[in-house]
Amino acid sequence: MPLLSGLHRYPVKSMYRQDLETAAVEPWGLRGDRRWMLARPSGLAVTQRDLPELARYRVASAADGALRVTSPEGDELQVPAPGSGQGATATEGDVFGTRFAAVEADPKAQLWFAERLGPHELGEVRLLHLADPLARQVAPAFSAPGETVSMADGFPLLAITTSSLAALNGWLTDGGQPGVPKERFRANLVIEGTEPWEEDGWRRVRVGGLTFRAVKLCGRCIVTTTDQETGERMGQEPLRTLAKRRRFDKKSAFGVNLIPERPDQVTASELGTLRLGDQVSVLARGERLPAA
């Protein structure tokens, strides 16, 4: 029986992960996942695509959404969770062309990041918070009306399987390259006990007591070439091999995007809880999912 063997969230988009044993699931993703991000003056997200060293910033988060960020040098920043009704500055964020309402972190946080990330071609970087999780719609081609997402690239959750990672690493080692760790793919859920690439055809899956729609394969980018411990680019792999072996719809695919389903009788924002070791069942299958 497949099992949930990894559970991760990323309180600030593109910063270091939190490894969890349990996580509450909300319609827009794991609670506390990617509710913050750095942005250019235009609101456009700043990620490891732009600044790979963001991987070195460690983040702890509180239940109310407040943050404690630790820089690579060990400096700490405390960031209270802002709200548009608490005097915070309202603004707009932008992730891949979708714009949504957000609020700015306090001026102390903005100065802290400006001092550490320094002047660069991105302009004055700001820390933004998604105060309203209903503010950003999932792409209509892959979702039902009213389904929303955090500041993640596009979907509430991303799952990968250890069998597909092993297959990819086999291709890499056959080509004389070292394998890559699962952390390169910045998944929320890591599932073991499946056949390689079987997630390509998933339609609905159950993890523990919750169900999810599988809607799209995840098209990968240069972030997969970045060491998530050091923030260094490590060459062209695994992106080059994925482009040769897993090129679908003009995307290099690895992992599957999921949207939570609301259980019967549950009306609150918390849909349920995932736990390491939860059993995973595939409830429906189909043809290969699109990657774009």
Image (cartoon, rainbow, N blue to C red):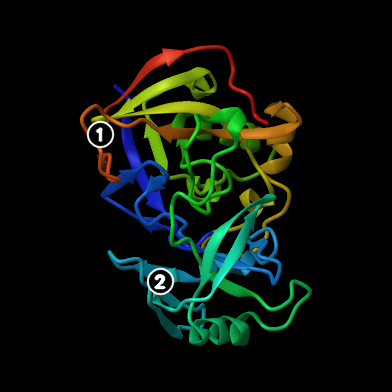
Say which quadrant the C terminus sits in. top right
Q: Amino acid at mark 2?
A: Gly
Residue depth check, mark 2 versus mark 1: number of the one nearer the observer: 2
Residue that badge 2 annotates:
85
Residue that badge 1 annotates:
278
Figure check: 280 above or below 180 = above
Relative image position of residue 184 (x, y in whole percent): 55, 50
Say which quadrant the N terminus sits in. top left
Does residue 152 appear to the left or right of 177 in the view shown?
Answer: left
Relative image position of residue 98 (x, y in whole percent): 65, 49
Q: CA distance from mark 2 to mark 1?
A: 39 Å
Q: Quadrant of residue 272?
A: top left
Q: Quadrant of residue 188?
A: top left
Front one among 204 and 101: 101
Q: Residue at x 69, y 42 (%)?
A: 239
Q: Residue at x 39, y 50 (%)?
A: 8
Front one among 13 and 199: 13
Q: Amino acid at mark 1?
A: Asp
